[in-house]
Image (cartoon, grey):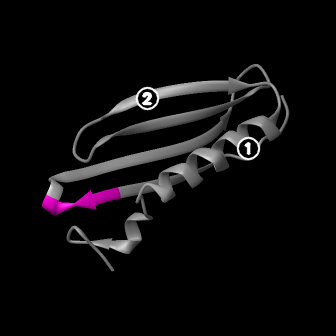
């Protein structure tokens, strides 16, 4: 098995005026068969949400998809949870 780097990012989108409290988690993890998986978990904060797992043969493909999804979510208003305090941006 090759040594793939495992990492993740955690994003939140909170807008009290719209009763919106969402999370979006992205994670890259190796598979047992030498591939690499991009795991997406999203939903309303306080729920387990939904999960989607996409498996790639090449790490570069998974990393490219990871960066693209993170960029799209940040454009839509998702931020790092350390920037959110009491439902407001810090």
Marks 1 and 2 sit apart, C-alpha to C-alpha, by 19 Å
What residue is rendered at 46% in x and 46% in y?
Answer: 25
Report the number of discs: 2
| Quadrant in which the C terminus is drawn | bottom left
- Quarter of the rendering containing residue 60: top right
The verdict on residue 57 being magenta is no
Query: In this picture, is 30 found above or below 73?
Result: above
- Quarter of the rendering containing residue 77: bottom left
Horizontal side of residue 57 vs 28, given as left or right: right
Horizontal side of residue 30 vs 57, given as left or right: left
Identify the secondary structure beneath mark 2.
strand
Q: Position of residue 9 (x, y in %)?
A: 53, 54
Q: Are marks 1 and 2 in contact (CB under 8 Å)?
A: no
Observer-nearest residue: 3 or 63?
63
The verdict on residue 16 being magenta is yes
Observer-nearest residue: 31 or 38?
38
What residue is rendered at 73% in x and 44% in y?
Answer: 63
Identify the secondary structure beneath mark 1.
helix
Question: Which residues, given as a range, are shown in magenta?
Answer: 13-17
Label 1: few (<14), some (14–19) or many (≥20) C-alpha neighbours in 10 Å: few
Q: Which residue is mark 2?
A: 51
What residue is rendered at 48% in x and 51% in y?
Answer: 73
Question: In the orientation shown, which residue stands out farthest toward the bottom?
Answer: 90
Q: Please, what is the dominant secondary structure of the magenta stretch?
A: strand
Of the numbered discs 1 and 2, the one sitting upstream in the chain is 2
Q: Position of residue 68 (x, y in %)?
A: 64, 47
Tell me, for residue 64, which label it has, or none.
1
Horizontal side of residue 61 vs 26, given as left or right: right
| Quadrant in which the N terminus is drawn | top right
Front disc: 1 or 2: 1
Query: In this picture, is 37 found above or below 6?
Result: above
Q: Position of residue 62 (x, y in %)?
A: 72, 37
């Amino acid at each position: 098995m090759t040594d793939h780097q495992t990492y993740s990012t955690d994003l939140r989108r909170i807008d009290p005026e719209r009763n919106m409290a969402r999370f979006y988690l992205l994670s890259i993890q190796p598979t047992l068969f030498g591939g690499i998986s991009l795991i997406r978990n999203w939903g309303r904060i306080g729920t387990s949400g939904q999960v989607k797992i996409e498996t790639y043969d090449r790490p570069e493909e998974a990393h490219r998809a990871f960066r693209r999804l993170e960029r799209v979510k940040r454009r839509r208003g998702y931020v790092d949870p350390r920037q959110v305090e009491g439902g407001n941006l810090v």
